Image (cartoon, rainbow, N blue to C red):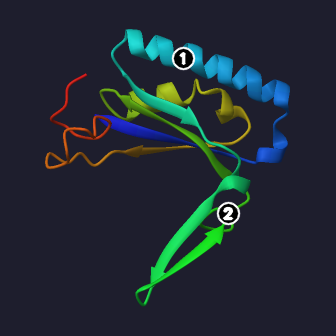
Amino acid sequence: MKYMLLIYGKEQDITETEHAQCREDSAQLCHELQKQGKFIAASPLHSVTTATSLRIRNGKRIITDGPFAETTEQLGGYYIIDVNDLDEALSVASRLPPVTKGTVEIRPIFEMDNLPASNKLISQGEKR
């Protein structure tokens, strides 16, 4: 089963040194998961200050700078993994470096067979 692990935290609470170590530790975990056939994708996101949000209301586009909602923690990155069950997803999430300072949201991915073949991350028909 595929899960997305969403990384939330307060951007100002992590130093550049901690961020660099987090990237290194995360890359190591990704390589480990790859060897086990469980890694699909992962990436940190640029600062929330670079975010643009889009809403369409009454047929009109509303574009705003920043994240989609007022929150104390911002979405900082993600992992997509293919594991047996929620317990295994929780085990992987507990090893993510940001979990000690922020929150990791674990959500199963709703798999759809009718997506284009180029969508290798989600399409159930594509095999790694």
The earlier-in-sequence mark between 1 and 2 is 1
| Relative to 13, 43 lies left or right | left
Asked if residue 123 can be seen in this view, the reply is yes
Residue wearing tag 1: 29
Quarter that holds the C terminus: top left
Residue at image point 70% right, 25% down: 22
Q: Is residue 31 above or below residue 22?
A: above
The amino acid on which the numbered mark 1 sits, given as a three-letter code, is Leu
Residue at image point 19% right, 37% down: 124
Could you tell me residue 68's position as x and y percent? 59, 66
Could you tell me residue 113's position as x and y percent? 14, 45
Quarter that holds the N terminus: top left
The amino acid on which the numbered mark 2 sits, given as a three-letter code, is Gly
- Front in this rendered view, residue 67 or 83: 67
Residue wearing tag 2: 66
- Front in this rendered view, residue 65 or 74: 65
Asked if residue 73 can be seen in this view, the reply is no
Residue at image point 19% right, 48% down: 115
Q: Distance between the residues labelled 1 and 2?
A: 30 Å
Q: In this view, does 56 lie above or below 72?
A: below
> Please, what secondary structure does the residue beneath circle 2 have?
loop
For mark 1, does the 10 Å Cα neighbourhood hold few (<14), some (14 to 19), or many (20 or more) residues?
A: some
Could you tell me residue 44's position as x and y percent? 60, 36
Could you tell me residue 114's position as x and y percent? 14, 49
| Relative to 24, 35 lies left or right | left
Q: Is residue 6 above or below residue 15?
A: below
Looking at the image, the residue that sits furthest to the bottom is 58
Residue at image point 65% right, 18% down: 25
